[in-house]
Image (tube, rainbow, N blue to C red):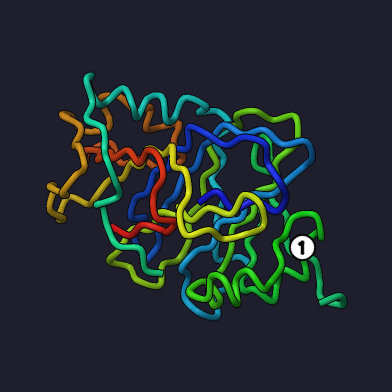
Amino acid sequence: MCCFSGRVEHVADTKLFARNAGRGRQYLVYEMQFESAADVAMILPLPVPTKSMEGDVRFPNLADYPTFFRDLESGFPKPRAKSEGFGVGSGSFGGGKPKLTVVKVGEFEASFVPTVNDFDRLDERFKLPSEIWLKELPQHRDWGFAVFKLKADSRQVHPMAFEFPRRKPDQLFFPTVHIHDGKVHDTAEYDHALYFQVTEQQPSKFFGWRESPRPAANFMKVAKSQSVISGTTHVHRFEIKGEQKNRDILV
């Protein structure tokens, strides 16, 4: 997803990776290029179980693996097929309170906001009006939110990784809804590459996705991935380009 707390001048080359982390949890890694005149937060709604707690989301530090997505791409020989649409999954989906825990993760700070009401515990600069979640995106009203604080002089930060509990453990979630100007539009301009790994017990064929010819250990630095990558399974890839329906993706 590209949901920002303030206006950004440019967002492009977005990449996401997802994998089952076991125990009903999911890994998600996010990277993009962006330009902003001021410090801004990227907010990612997450379909966590209701009554999730502030400490239920973990933030692996990939500052020492800035080439995470470059290495992923190297696992897919050229030429690569271009997509013409989604076709990859479904699109479902106060003042006295103590401040939320802020985790320093490499070049940025991160927090987990358990509910919409907990945004009151976050710095005013790094949140969106609650009406967006309650009225324009009601499917997210009882979700949690991962918040990454980005500096204005950033252009491309190292991959942002986190691990969260899933409401539906049999689905992988990609946050791809856009909010760039404080509004939710029916369609949005996409420049995304999505990657995921399945467990060895799951089927390996997914309509529209390309599968890497070799397991990830052949092209990824597994030891530097903080357990996010499994070296024994293949990776699947899909591109989303151009004007598309503005929604999240489930696989």
Judging by the rendered image, the residue that carries numbered circle 1 is: 122
Foreground of the two, 240 or 188? 188
Foreground of the two, 209 or 53? 209
Residue 154 occupies quadrant: top right
Residue drawn 51% across the image and 79% down it: 50
Residue 119 occupies quadrant: bottom right
Mark 1 is on which residue type? Answer: Leu
Residue 243 point in image, percent of width and height: 41, 44
Outermost residue toward the right? Answer: 96
Residue drawn 20% across the image and 37% down it: 210
Depicted 123 relative to depicted 72: above or below: below
Residue 120 point in image, percent of width and height: 77, 71
Residue 21 point in image, percent of width and height: 37, 55
Residue drawn 48% across the image and 56% down it: 177
Residue drawn 35% across the image and 63% down it: 91
Q: Secondary structure at mark 1?
A: loop
